[in-house]
């Protein structure tokens, strides 16, 4: 494993995502005074070789806090960046959260003005994932306290597909990472409650209206779900050791049939950390994440992990 520090500054840098686009790596993350400050901006950085990084743009919203940037590639080949925005001074008590999208124009190397559709008010849509020419994203909080699965043709304008979505109203279900295997969808959902609560894995067949949920064997946060080329499933997330009161960013194998996570890799990390982006390319797994184990602030990291199969097995070591 090789790890590079992509960005460090006096600000708190966190909540990453990663994509390979137009022969370059693209990493996006939030910068703000603190983890929960209301001044967040999104910095987008690019690198041809994964070692030397430069800022492509910094996206801001006057009077708002931009958070949780997520890349996806539309069916027309255009790069989309979605994010959530919190008003520093809300317009009203019901619309403190907005979900929005930025479309990249390769010809001018610029991002268009953000689009907030009517369904993006008072919800936090997370990590759009594309399948069969449609984007899917799970919204939570605000009006979607019990979750809503949204669908979009262009990644900017969304319609409700299924609500309520989450299986248990007694806990706060929130960040949800979607992935597809053919016409089967998987949803890895973080849950929070006093004293802690384990995550859940949802499974549905097309048209993704009837979901079946299983409880995982541990809690997690800032997660990313990915199916590797050999058919194995992995999840990157923050793992908390309650006995030691410590956290690490980890990547674990996931048995999607049994809803069981198995330890695999621990990334150099600690403290305030996680929110990974993961891309498999050319026999390597590339990972973006943030961590605060070096210095006083959280920094952004890029890890490259060789994927080698075991003898007489298709599983990666």
Image (cartoon, helix red, strand yellow):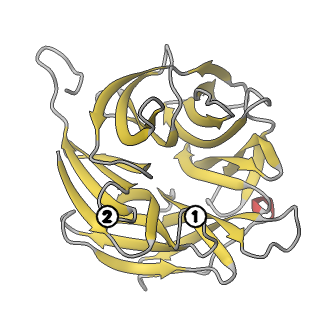
Q: Percent x, y for residue 145? A: 79, 44
* Residue projecting furthest to the front: 244
Q: What residue is disc 2 on?
A: 295
Nearer to me, 86 or 132 = 86
Where residue 144 sits in the image (x, y, percent)?
A: 79, 47
> Residue at 37% across / 55% down in the picture?
291
Is residue 306 toward the left or the right of residue 213 in the image? Answer: left
Identify the element where label 1 is drawn.
strand
Whether residue 23 is visible: no
Left or right of residue 94, residue 282 in this image: left
Question: Which residue is at a point 47% across and 80% down the rendered structure image?
Answer: 58
Please name whichever residue, 180 or 276, is drawn nearer the observer in this view of the structure: 276
Outermost residue to the left: 311
Marks counted in the figure total 2
Residue at 18%, 65% in the rendered image: 49
* Residue 264 image-quadrant placement: top left
Is residue 267 depicted above or below 252 in this figure?
below
- Quarter that holds the N terminus: top left
Question: Viewed as shown, does residue 159 lie left or right of 236?
Answer: right
Left/right of residue 148 with respect to residue 53 in the rendered view: right
Q: Which residue is mark 1?
A: 67
């Amino acid at each position: 494993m090789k790890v590079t520090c992509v960005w460090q500054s006096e600000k708190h840098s966190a909540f990453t995502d990663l994509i390979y686009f137009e022969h370059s790596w693209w990493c996006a993350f939030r910068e703000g005074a603190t983890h929960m400050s209301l001044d967040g901006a999104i910095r987008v950085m690019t690198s041809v070789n994964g070692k030397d990084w430069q800022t492509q743009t910094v996206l801001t919203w006057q009077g708002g806090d931009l958070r949780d940037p997520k890349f996806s590639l539309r069916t027309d080949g255009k790069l989309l960046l979605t994010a959530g925005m919190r008003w520093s001074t809300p317009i009203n008590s019901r619309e403190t959260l907005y979900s929005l999208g930025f479309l990249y124009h390769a010809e001018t190397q610029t991002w268009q003005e953000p689009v907030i559709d009517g369904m993006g008010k008072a919800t936090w849509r997370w990590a759009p994932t594309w399948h069969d020419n449609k984007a899917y994203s799970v919204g939570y909080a605000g009006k979607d306290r019990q979750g809503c699965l949204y669908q979009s043709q262009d990644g900017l304008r969304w319609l409700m597909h299924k609500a309520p979505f989450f299986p248990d109203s007694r806990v706060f279900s929130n960040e949800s990472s979607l992935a597809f295997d053919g016409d089967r969808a998987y949803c890895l959902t973080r849950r929070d409650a006093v004293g802690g609560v384990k995550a859940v894995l949802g499974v549905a067949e097309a048209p993704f209206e009837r979901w079946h949920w299983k409880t995982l064997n541990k809690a997690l946060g800032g997660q990313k779900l990915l199916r590797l080329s050999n058919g194995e499933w992995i999840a990157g997330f923050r793992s908390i050791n309650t006995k030691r009161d410590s956290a690490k960013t980890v990547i674990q194998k996931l048995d999607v049939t049994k809803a069981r996570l198995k330890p695999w890799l621990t990334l150099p990390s600690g403290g305030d950390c996680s929110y990974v982006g993961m891309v498999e390319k050319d026999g390597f797994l590339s990972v973006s994440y943030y961590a605060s184990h070096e210095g006083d602030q959280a920094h952004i990291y890029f890890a490259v992990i060789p994927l080698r199969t075991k003898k007489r097995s298709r599983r990666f070591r």
